[in-house]
Image (cartoon, rainbow, N blue to C red):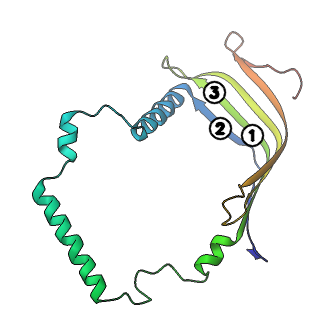
Amino acid sequence: QKIGEVHLTDLKFVTLTPIDLTISMQNAALASALATSISDSFSTNKETSEDEAERHSISAREARRIARLDSELERVEDIEPMTPSEHSTDVSVHAGQQIEQMRKLTRLKMTSPEVILTLTNDFQGLDEALFKVIAMNWVFGGELDYPGASASEKPCFGFNMNTSFLADYFDTASNRWENFLTSPW
């Protein structure tokens, strides 16, 4: 939605039933291992082996071939100028420069009567509940404002949340949930 020079995006999520999310320790450990593996794959390793350097180097023949292809492409571009429809920026409904300079405002609103997060221990082959955190009457709102093409202005954000928390732990001796917090927080 466009309002003047502002591109406004509203995202709203409303649930009428409680959201119940259960996280197991094995799944948490797996997610942690995956996140570590992914972040390690993006890190740079300054110690490169000779085999790796040889694998990424090109031969003199390949370098000459690439140079020949490059000079041929430059020659073709000099002879045949590009028509406006070829390889230009996408000029669809929005003009390229106008969309970059337009201020973008994104709003997010989420509401739920109850959100329950339960953590279970399943390392020993049994699913044993550890604790749960309950957010009652959960209302969240946030706003992200991108000022536009100006490099001097930084994005601004703000958010608010209104809820009350309860926490319970599972007592294996009595085989039932016991209050961890005596009153909502």
Lower sequence index among marks 2 and 1: 2
Along the line of sight, the residue nearer the viewer: 123 or 40: 40
What distance separates the C-alpha of mark 1 from that of mark 3? Answer: 13 Å
- Residue 170 picture location, percent across and down: 70, 19
- Residue 155 vs residue 164: left or right? left
What distance separates the C-alpha of mark 2 from that of mark 1? Answer: 8 Å
Q: Residue at x 17, y 42 (%)?
A: 54
**Residue 131 image-quadrant placement:** top right
Lower sequence index among marks 2 and 3: 2
Along the line of sight, the residue nearer the viewer: 8 or 185: 8
Along the line of sight, the residue nearer the viewer: 74 or 51: 74
The three-letter amino acid code for the residue at tag 2 is: Leu
Q: Is residue 160 above or below residue 63?
A: above
**Residue 97 image-quadrant placement:** bottom right
What SS does tag 1 mark?
Answer: strand
- Residue 64 picture location, percent across and down: 14, 63
Q: Is residue 3 above or below residue 144?
A: below
To which residue does mark 1 refer? 115
The three-letter amino acid code for the residue at tag 3 is: Leu
Q: Residue furthest top?
A: 173
The three-letter amino acid code for the residue at tag 1 is: Val
To which residue does mark 2 refer? 21
Q: Pointers 2 and 1 in contact (CB under 8 A)?
A: yes
To which residue does mark 3 refer? 119
**Residue 95 image-quadrant placement:** bottom right
Q: Is residue 91 above or below residue 114?
A: below
- Residue 161 vs residue 144: left or right? right
Q: Is residue 16 visible?
A: no
- Residue 3 picture location, percent across and down: 79, 75
Q: Quick one: label 1, few (<14), some, or many (20+) residues within 10 Å?
A: many
